[in-house]
Amino acid sequence: MSSKKVVLYFTADITDQPIIYRLVKDYDLVINILQADINPQKEGTLVVELTGDNFGPGIEYLRRLGVAVQPLTEEIIQNEEKCVSCGACTAICPTGALYIERPDMLVKFNSDRCVVCRLCVKACPMKAMEVRF
Amino acid sequence: MAVEKTYQEINERIKKGRAVVVTAEELVSMVKEKGITRVTSEVDVVTTGTFGPMCSSGAFLSLGHTKPRMKMHKVWLNDVPAYTGIAAVDAFIGATEVPEDDPLNSIYPGEFRYGGGHVIQDLVAGKTVRLKATAYGTDCYPRKEIETEITINDINEAILFNPRNAYQNYNCAVNLTNRTIYTYMGMLKGNLGNAHYSTSGQLSPLLKDPNFKTIGVGTRIFLGGGIGYVVWNGTQHFPGINMDESGTGFGHAGGTLAVLGDLKQMSPRWLAGTSMLGYGATLTVGLGIPIPMLNEEVCRYAAAGDDELYAPIVDYGEQYPNFIPSNLGYVSYAELKSGKIKVNGKEVPSAPMSSYSRAKEIAGTLKQWIQKGDFLLGEPVQLLPNTEAGIKANSLKG
């Protein structure tokens, strides 16, 4: 069973639809919400990891509703040549993808937990966090 | 009788390859196990280290004469202005200088991707650096402009001279406002979203000799991957004791060092150009100091562990920028290193700005140099002022 990370863009008129419920109930998808920014009557984005045999039909359902679906193709890379393990990124990373391994106090990056919010890319004093397409 | 050792005795042992050297981290557990008296007699030197962003760093460059001669008036290195009001072809490149066309904070928060610290790192890495200079022309120095390329090997001298490094202790920075702020202590999320600290705690040089009993003018040190020297106290050297409102002491703070060394023997691994989002450019400096175990008192201070060393918690949202003395309490480096602290009753994620793993590597490298007999201790010709000097900070009027 494959699992894929996608970015969903909503327009304001469909934020009242219970689409996650439909994806679970009708398409039997396992949904892991990585990032969500949805406000009533405003456009919103969701970054989700979808797992299940009905991935294709589920995506088709979303597109029919008017949700723009894009694969999450950007990823963040920790440039280990540049990283000095200072730790400045670890308390601002919202998902714990960047963390300090104790007791060695080395900065580690778990890309599976990364939602590509890019806070670390901006905040890294060594410019060691890079976006790859 | 209590042990008393001299620099000469320790250096003799270093020369013979018989000196016992441990890192400050190793000393902490050693003393817990064996006690001060035994460790003081067994150990000759304790090595410390720190690797963090250190403003008040820079390099003097003596560029060499041009033909015809030129008395440089303005100098740029990779578009970053250097100060040349010293002599005809001498310039000082400061770590925090940025190019004149840098957008700064006009697009907030500014990125400050390249500045003086990056120029220094590029030079140390042996990279080619663009030199531009202008002059007004004199009878003896007629040339008015030059654009050329240099490397660190082409120029006559390159001397790292950092007027204020190795802060003894530093604030743990938090943000009590409700918006994210961008500081020299990193990105601080509002409503106590995170807490940043910036010393290597039990490895930090001036926390391990807090009364300046061994560190002074002439102390030989690890600087930027090479050998350097303590040449004076640093600027803003205000050695004191941190206290809470009830007068309880929380250890030493306020000491700083001025350090110098030949940039040509240093390494880009230990001098790294640094960009603080929304704040500016600077240089991250690797610095390590050997502390001779002259007696039990020196050893006792050097053996302080992360659980015995404290940082003051300071609000960088309102109080720090407005120069309002504030203290939200003290927190031990053991707590800070755990990744979670308590501030105003709230659990706050804590993260360092200075690299403990690199600090440990510096202390380990210095230990090896001394063990191999390559690095002798420099006996200070003059110790630096300590808390007894009662130095008070002045601030500007207006």
Image (cartoon, coloured by chain):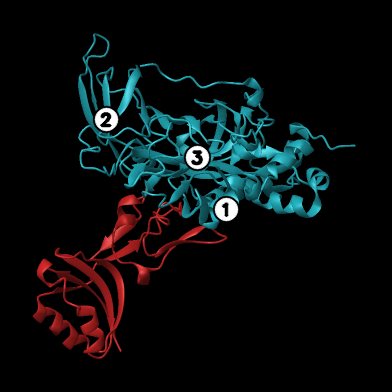
Chain colours: A red, B cyan
In space, the residues marked 3 and 1 are separated at their CA atoms by: 14 Å
Q: Secondary structure at mark 2?
A: strand
Q: Nearer the viewer, mark 2 or mark 1?
A: 1
Q: Amino acid at mark 3?
A: Asn
On the question of residue B126 being in view, the answer is no
Q: Are marks 3 and 2 on the same chain?
A: yes
Alpha-carbon neighbours of circle 3 within 10 Å: few (<14), some, or many (≥20)? Answer: many
Identify the residue at image location x=42%, y=34%.
B320
Q: Which residue is mark 3?
A: B171
Q: Nearer the viewer, mark 3 or mark 2?
A: 3
Q: Nearer the viewer, residue A3 or B24?
A: A3
On the question of residue B119 being in view, the answer is yes
Alpha-carbon neighbours of circle 2 within 10 Å: few (<14), some, or many (≥20)? Answer: many
Percent position of residue B154, x then y: 36, 34
In space, the residues marked 3 and 2 are separated at their CA atoms by: 34 Å
In space, the residues marked 2 and 1 are separated at their CA atoms by: 45 Å
Q: To which chain does the residue with label 2 belong?
A: B
Numbered mark located on residue B335 in the image = 1
Numbered mark located on residue B76 in the image = 2
Q: To which chain does the residue with label 3 belong?
A: B
Instruction: Find residue B152 and report its image quarter.
Output: top left
Percent position of residue B3, x then y: 84, 37
Q: Amino acid at mark 2?
A: Trp
Identify the residue at image location x=23%, y=70%.
A46
Q: Give the residue at the far right of this rendering.
A: B1
Identify the residue at image location x=48%, y=19%.
B394
Q: Secondary structure at mark 3?
A: loop
Q: Amino acid at mark 1?
A: Glu
Q: Secondary structure at mark 1?
A: helix
Q: Is residue B296 left or right of residue B206?
A: right
Percent position of residue B321, x then y: 38, 33
